[in-house]
Image (cartoon, helix red, strand yellow):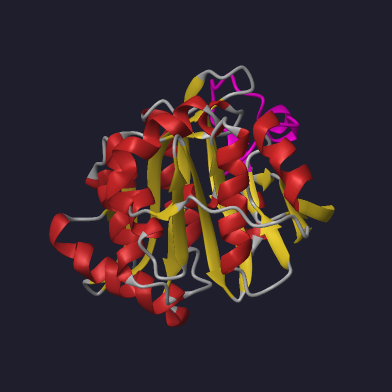
Amino acid sequence: MAEYRSIRTEEWPDALVMWNEVFGAGSWLFHSLHKGTAGRKWDHCAVAVEDGEIVSAVDVFLRERRDVDGRPVKVGCIGSVATYPEHRRKGHSIHLLQMALETMRREGCEWSFLFTGVPEHYARLGWKTAPLRSRLGSWSDRPSIGGTRQASRYEWEELAPIYDATVGRLPLAAIRDPLSWKYAQGARIARPEQVLLRIGDSYALAKIDGETELQELAGSNPEELDALLSAVREGSSSQDIRLGIARTPENEAAIERWMVDVREETSLWAMARPIERGEVNVEALFAHPLAHHHALDNF
């Protein structure tokens, strides 16, 4: 019979092994989320244990995100939901998700956010599909512009105020504290397929691994944004690009200058639900025309 409880400190390496085996993402991802979450407690991670072995786990990462009016609210981000294949269909994850809901209530979360490929599993406990918008486009033939340089994760203290003053002010945007920048965002920026570019008071983050994906574009100077888009185009191996950037007026103007045949896409792999006594209208938040989630804030 399974024992359901909070993970213990000495069991963390075993959980990393399970997550890596189930997801194949590498333990760096789960460790970076653990270290990059302020106010982290061991009881935020619930596990099912059989015969002394962790067989299933659900983790809650407490983050702040902006409401439709820009107000920071505490959000319970559900991640690392995993069960060894031979222990599935025993109700472990449902039991652990119920524990996670209680954790989020206790911690004062207003709503909960997760990503999944099996939405029907979470719908049983009240999560609903929360559409996220992105776009596809093709590069224009504008002349190239130089002046950018490749940056590194260790420049986060300079990137943070740029983010906060531009794309970090929009509805749904994650509020990134120093711990998050240093570990959670930092670990993703450091991945070999990622390219971080800077010029002046602007930056761009692009994933260049087969299909090019522009994941962040932040700044207010049109000339700097033009130089960044030019540099991303130069590094692209395809004429097409996926646009995962926030829709600030400055970004939209830059896209008009550098892209043609831009078309909308909707992703249905996110889910959300309010937590009791929360004041956020989750459906209105995701429906807001400027609402945006950056891939760098995945969990």
State which quadrant residue 201 falls in: top left
Q: Which residues are magenta?
A: 272-293
Q: Is residue 57 above or below residue 161?
A: below
- The image shows residue 244 at horizontal and vertical percentages of 64, 51
Q: Tell whether position 53 is magenta.
A: no
Which residue is rendered at x = 58% and y = 59% of the image? 232
Q: Residue furthest left?
A: 10
Asked if the stretch drawn in magenta spans residue 286, the answer is: yes
- Seen from the viewer's position, the closer of residues 231 and 297 is 231
Q: Residue at x 28, y 59 (%)?
A: 31
Q: Position of residue 198 (x, y in %)?
A: 44, 47
Q: Residue at x 72, y 32 (%)?
A: 283
- Is residue 145 left or right of 257 when viewed as pictured? left
> Is any part of residue 103 visible from this angle?
no
Percent x, y of residue 149 = 42, 54
For the point 46% across and 63% down, the residue is: 194
Report the label total.
0
Q: Position of residue 237 (x, y in %)?
A: 63, 75
136 over 35 or under it: above or below:
below
On the picture, is 151 further left or further right than 290?
A: left
Outermost residue to the bottom: 86
Q: Nearer the viewer, residue 285 or 90?
A: 285
